Amino acid sequence: MASDRRADGSAGPSEAPSEALAAATSPALPERVRIVEVGPRDGFQMEPGFLPTELKIELIDVLSRSGLAEIEATSFVHPEAIPQLRDAAEVMADIARAPGVRYSALVPNLRGAERALGAGVDALHMVIAATETYNRRNVRMGQGESMAQLERIARRAAEASPAVPVAVTLAVTFGCPFEGQLETGEIVRLARRVASAGAREIGLADTAGLAHPHLVRRIVAEVRGALPDTALRLHLHDTRGLAPANALAAMELGVDTFDSAFGGLGGCPILRGATGNLATEELVNLCDELGVATGVDLEVVRRASRRLAQHLGRTLPSRVLAAGTREELYRANRGQGE
Ligand code: COA
Ligand code: ZN
């Protein structure tokens, strides 16, 4: 195969023709994707043991230097509901905030929002589930009560100086283990409700990893059509290996903000068989391959993953963390096939 390798050995065989083909056949992709790193929240909440506060801070500080746009640093929930994140205020107080990085936190109610605002977060991510059953199990209140909490949170966040933006993440949008898949019209109605209650951004979450590209296209297209002025973010779990395919399907519809977790950490505490988020390494690698800018230095993200893997004494699920990039593969094997 040496004959069709580039002279400098840096790129794969037949690179130029396949890129020309891609440009001719692929739908337009966003020029740039914003990545919200949720490992410190979605990931750390799932670790069976409590991660030392200093380690959380060290890892967030590494991630802060990777070029990520935003880090969901923790959650301000009931300390008995998620004991792993009971140190939320200490984490927020002691991280070294990098200029240009937004530090957000997940909150379930007004009490959590007040604690988060007191800790100086840049943005609030409230979580409301798309189904009544899931919402009750997760936050012990009905959707109506969550909506009322959201209105109060939005008012309180608007009074902060400077005002703090509120996003709502709609859990189980792409399928609920208890209620199944909601009608798309139902999801659109919920999205309208949260937008009119004060959400500036809506995160559509595939909490149980049930999404597939057709479903992503259908739901994203409907929600965007109904709410063209509300920013959309996708929160994908890679439970069935479809998260990168789902991300690509959403990008092809112009979605440019994605949650992901370093190392592929993540899960959901009330869900049996829950697995990790779309890995940040895989999302960055996908975007790099597609020529979509992220501003993220993959090596710095991997530094955080390797540090955590070393602390935990186990490998993390991210495949790009294990396998490296295409460039690295070629570099490592240069000259071997001759
Ligand atoms: N942070 C800290 N304490 C909180 C709190 C918060 N966000 N919300 C409520 N509390 C306190 C109240 O002040 C009250 O304290 P008191 O007994 O001293 O007066 C007590 O908790 C009970 O309040 P209540 O509103 O009845 O809460 P609850 O017991 O029904 O629990 C939630 C509701 C939302 C706080 C809890 O279910 C929760 O934190 N869930 C988070 C789930 C989660 O993170 N899931 C994974 C991410 S999607
Ligand atoms: Zn999640």
Image (cartoon, rainbow, N blue to C red):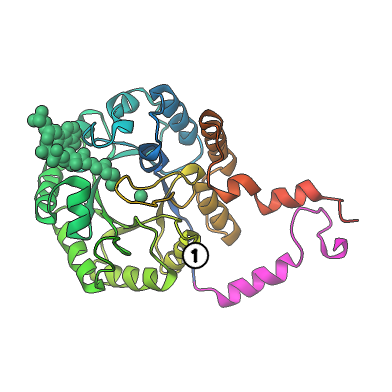
**x, y percentage for residue 334?**
82, 50
Q: Considering only vertical position in the picture, is 141 above or below 303?
A: below
Q: In which quarter of the image is the C terminus?
A: bottom right
Residue at point 51%, 43% (across, down)? 263
Tell me the crowding category of disc 1: few under 14, some 14 to 19, or many 20 or more residues within 10 angstroms, Cα based: some
Q: Is residue 262 magenta?
A: no
Label 1 sits on a secondary structure element that is: helix
Residue at point 12%, 53% (across, down)? 142
Q: Is residue 20 magenta?
A: yes
Q: In which quarter of the image is the N terminus?
A: bottom right
Q: Mark 1 points at which residue?
A: 245
The reply, left or right, for residue 59 in relation to residue 73 is: right
Residue 160 in view of the camera:
no
Q: Considering only vertical position in the picture, is 133 above or below 125?
A: below
Residue 43 in view of the camera:
yes
* Nearer to us in this view, 132 or 293: 132
**x, y percentage for residue 238?**
46, 56
